[in-house]
């Protein structure tokens, strides 16, 4: 498998989408003759788009139970891996992906409290063992990231969860970064957009030149 799977992770409002877009433009302009694609979870496939609507809409009259939520994210991922990630990796493509398996550990594991063994098993099943080659963790305090998302306007179902939930998610990322230092690289996402982008470029440059 010749391509690269590069994932952007962090709490909502950490700047993933902004930084993924800037990284995409920078990589395109700076030398790589490899194809570069942008993708995201949930919702990059036709099936995934329907699942994304089910997962994030706020109009449900009944709560979605954590186990059902976990299975829906896993279904989105299974389709995404087969339909998008594996075919792209087979053609030497650099994939920039907004969220992947670490999101499930952080949100459904640390956030919702589902057992880690269940999540690891399901992540493995959904991905067929495909891990990211590099994960860029945008680390910013939850109090800052939630102000950013609320300034942006309407909140989705998960953004509406209480502060404690978001803090557990953040702690999940912190633990993951400590556990997998070779795969997960932290950037200080509390800085302005350009300063965050500079850190990311340095990480990308180092990783892609290896
Ligand atoms: N989820 C899950 O629970 N389990 C899973 O397995 C997976 C996902 C895969 C997907 O939502 C939801 O699904 C997500 C986790 C859950 N939870 N929520 N909510 P999404 O795809 O709609 O959104 P998101 O991934 O959470 O991202 P986001 O809210 O769009 O935030 P972001 O992409 O990290 O940030 P942004 O859009 O780039 O920036 C947010 C705002 O901040 C925007 O107005 C920017 O202009 C501003 N911004 C960005 N950077 C800066 C800096 N550096 N300074 C100041 N302001 C900034």
Image (tube, rainbow, N blue to C red):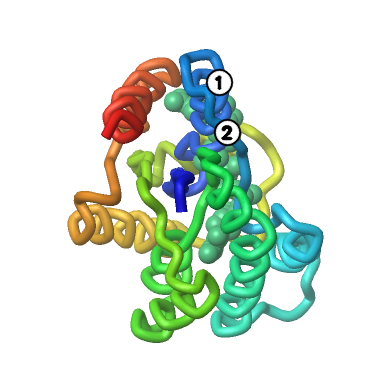
* Residue beneath the point at 46% across and 54% down: 1
Q: Is residue 92 left or right of residue 50?
A: left
- Quarter of the image where one finds residue 193: top left
The picture places residue 102, in percent across and down from the top left corner, at 41, 61
Q: Is residue 102 left or right of residue 12?
A: left
* Residue beneath the point at 35% across and 80% down: 116
Contact (Cβ within 8 Å) of mark 1 with mark 2: yes
Tell me, for residue 28, which label it has, or none: 1
Q: Is residue 95 visible?
A: no
Q: Is residue 198 visible?
A: yes
Q: Residues within 10 Å of mark 2 (few under 14, many from 20)?
A: some
Residue situated in front as seen by the camera: 26 or 83 = 83
Mark before the other along the chain sequence, 1 or 2? 1
Residue situated in front as seen by the camera: 90 or 178 = 90
The picture places residue 6, in percent across and down from the top left corner, at 44, 44
The picture places residue 43, in percent across and down from the top left corner, at 70, 56
The alpha-carbon separation of the residues under discs 1 and 2 comes to 7 Å
Q: Which quadrant of the figure shows ligand 1?
A: top right
> Which residue is label 2 attached to?
36
């Amino acid at each position: 498998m010749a391509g690269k799977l590069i994932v952007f992770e962090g709490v909502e409002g950490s700047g993933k989408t902004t930084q993924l877009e800037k990284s995409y433009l920078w990589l395109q302009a700076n030398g790589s003759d490899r194809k570069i694609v942008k993708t995201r979870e949930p919702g990059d496939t036709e099936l995934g788009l329907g699942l994304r609507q089910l997962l994030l809409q706020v109009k449900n009259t009944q709560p979605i139970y954590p186990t059902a939520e976990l299975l829906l994210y896993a279904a989105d991922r299974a389709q995404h891996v087969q339909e998008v990630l594996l075919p792209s990796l087979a053609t030497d493509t650099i994939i920039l992906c907004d969220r992947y398996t670490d999101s499930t550990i952080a949100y459904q594991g640390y956030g919702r409290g589902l057992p880690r063994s269940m999540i690891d098993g399901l992540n493995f099943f959904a991905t067929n063992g495909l891990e990211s080659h590099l994960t860029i963790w945008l680390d910013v305090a939850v109090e800052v990231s939630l102000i950013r998302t609320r300034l942006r306007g309407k909140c989705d179902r998960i953004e509406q969860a209480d502060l404690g939930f978001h803090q557990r998610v953040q702690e999940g990322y912190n633990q993951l970064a400590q556990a997998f230092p070779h795969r997960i690289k932290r950037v200080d996402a509390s800085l302005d957009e350009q300063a965050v982008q500079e850190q990311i470029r340095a990480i990308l440059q180092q990783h892609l030149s290896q």
